[in-house]
Amino acid sequence: MKVQHFQALVIGALCLGAAVLAAEAYNHHQQLAELQAAARDTPADPAPALRRDIDALSNTLATLQPQVAALGEAQGQSASAQAGLSQQLAELTASMKALQATTRGPSSADLTRLEQRLAAVETAIEKLSTPAAVPAAAITRPATAIGQKTKAKSPTPPFTLLGIETRGAVRFVAALPAGTRALSAVHLLQPGDSLNNWQLRTIREDQAVFHVPDHGDRTLPLP
């Protein structure tokens, strides 16, 4: 009986130990299953992808920095060039306005015509310089009558008119001062201009009207 009782106790202990081991094994299996499920549900570590993106952005930034610097320098040069061009344009505009406001000098054709007219005027001056024969009746006139006639006459023009010159829509009277024959001495007069105190008032079709101090207006023919 003792042997049987001992065997029963041993068998019972073994069964109890087996049950305990089975329970622990089950618990461990459940924990492992839970860990595997948690591992599957856990998202992948984003650190490697983020590091790759950061490295790529750093490389791109390092590549773009020289380009940005070059663009800034080019923009500065462009602004400087634009400022210089604006200044040149302003200077050219001012020069053009000054040229437009200034009377244009005579062209070669104008000079040629003036030379021809000057030659004709010189011929006329030579003819006028030849003393004319004085009639005997004029010699016998009283001195008082000659003095009165001299006072009645208007003064002789201190120049010779050569004609009308046109510059665009502006007309000028070409006048050569008395006692000169050089082409460089020719004056181009507009209404309001004066030559030897004779002020040009009006330019007509074939006449020029001058104002003479103390004598009023004087109309001279144009060749």
Image: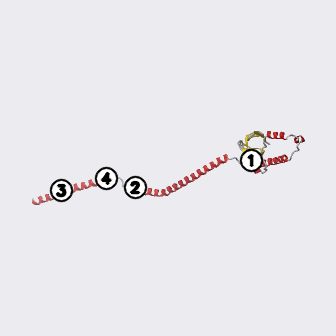
Q: Are marks 1 and 2 in contact (CB under 8 Å)?
A: no
Q: Is residue 36 left or right of residue 168?
A: left
Residue corresponding to mark 4: 38
- Check the image and report above or below for 125 versus 61: above
The three-letter amino acid code for the residue at tag 1 is His
Q: Secondary structure at mark 3?
A: helix
Distance of label 1 from label 4 (alpha carbons): 112 Å
Dot 2 or dot 3: first in sequence order is 3
How far across and down, in percent of the image, does residue 149 sit?
82, 39
Dot 1 or dot 4: first in sequence order is 4
* Labels 4, 3: front one: 4
Distance of label 1 from label 2 (alpha carbons): 90 Å
Mark 1 is surrounded, within 10 Å at the Cα level, by few (under 14), some (14 to 19) or many (20 or more) other residues, namely: some
Q: Secondary structure at mark 2?
A: helix
How far across and down, in percent of the image, does residue 117 sit?
80, 47
Residue at left offset 65%, top offset 48%:
98
Q: Are marks 1 and 4 in contact (CB under 8 Å)?
A: no
Residue corresponding to mark 3: 16
